[in-house]
Image (tube, rainbow, N blue to C red):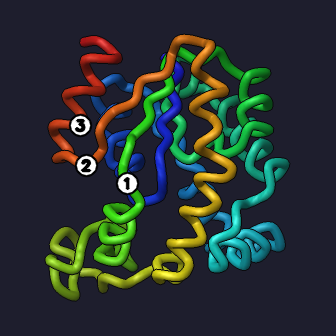
Amino acid sequence: MNIIMFGPPGSGKGTQAAMIAERYGIPHISTGDMFRAAMEQKTELGMQIAERMEKGILISDEITAKLVELRLKETDCTEGCILDGFPRTIAQAEALDSLIDLGFVIVLDVPDDVVLKRILNRRTCSKCQRITTTDEGAQCQKCNGELVKRSDEKEEVIKHRLLVYHDQTAPLLEYYKPKDITYVIDGTRTVEEIFQDIIKVLGE
């Protein structure tokens, strides 16, 4: 069961991917998490990633594809995986075709105005990295860590990320359509409603 989850930033990909991973017992592979880990290690590669992410610029296809290729070779991926944030370009999709056989492409459809509102209201725990909203206050209800706004969640950066998404990632919908494995889900509803629709696609 190899699954791609894609949609605009703030569409809820990470939340749904984590729920799918838990239900079906497959690893959730998030390129965002891999990028942040590289940044925390402050390697030369991590510094390059940090600079690009702060400006809302996509990480190069070569860097991203290599990180994903290494991850897919790990033993926990033998029964399948769910990819969150990869591929983001046609070139990355072509690279992925040579690595695994895809079963499902799940697309979360969310309008730009909803995305902007969601991300501006989002906060991340500086301690456990849990994502929540401003409604939670200043401290994480799970670990009491400080809730902070990420540097790539400013309005001008979000708008740029949306432009990049429509230019480089949205064309993946047409790329995967001929394969007859693409399913578009309304991502404006509650987390549970979206998840139930995804289960209908993937099966029990």
Q: Seen in the image, is 128 located left or right of residue 31? A: left
Nearest to N terminus: mark 3 or mark 2: 2
Q: Nearer the viewer, residue 166 or 12?
A: 166
Q: Nearer the viewer, residue 18 or 58?
A: 58
For the residues bearing labels 1 and 2, Cβ distance under 8 angstroms? yes
Q: Residue at x 17, y 84 (%)?
A: 137
From mark 3 to mark 2, how far is it between C-alphas?
8 Å
Mark 3 is surrounded, within 10 Å at the Cα level, by few (under 14), some (14 to 19) or many (20 or more) other residues, namely some
**The disc label shown at residue 152, or none:** none
Q: Which residue is mark 1?
A: 111
Q: Secondary structure at mark 2?
A: loop
Residue 35 lies, in percent from the top left, at 64, 61
Q: Nearer the viewer, residue 149 or 190?
A: 190
Q: Which mark is nearer the camera, 1 or 3?
A: 1
**The disc label shown at residue 194, or none:** 3
Q: Is residue 194 above or below residue 64?
A: above
Residue 200 lies, in percent from the top left, at 25, 17
Residue 173, quarter of the rendered image:
top right
Question: Does residue 128 show up?
Answer: no
Q: Is residue 151 above or below residue 24?
A: below
For the residues bearing labels 1 and 3, Cβ distance under 8 angstroms? no
Q: Seen in the image, is 190 located left or right of residue 198? A: left
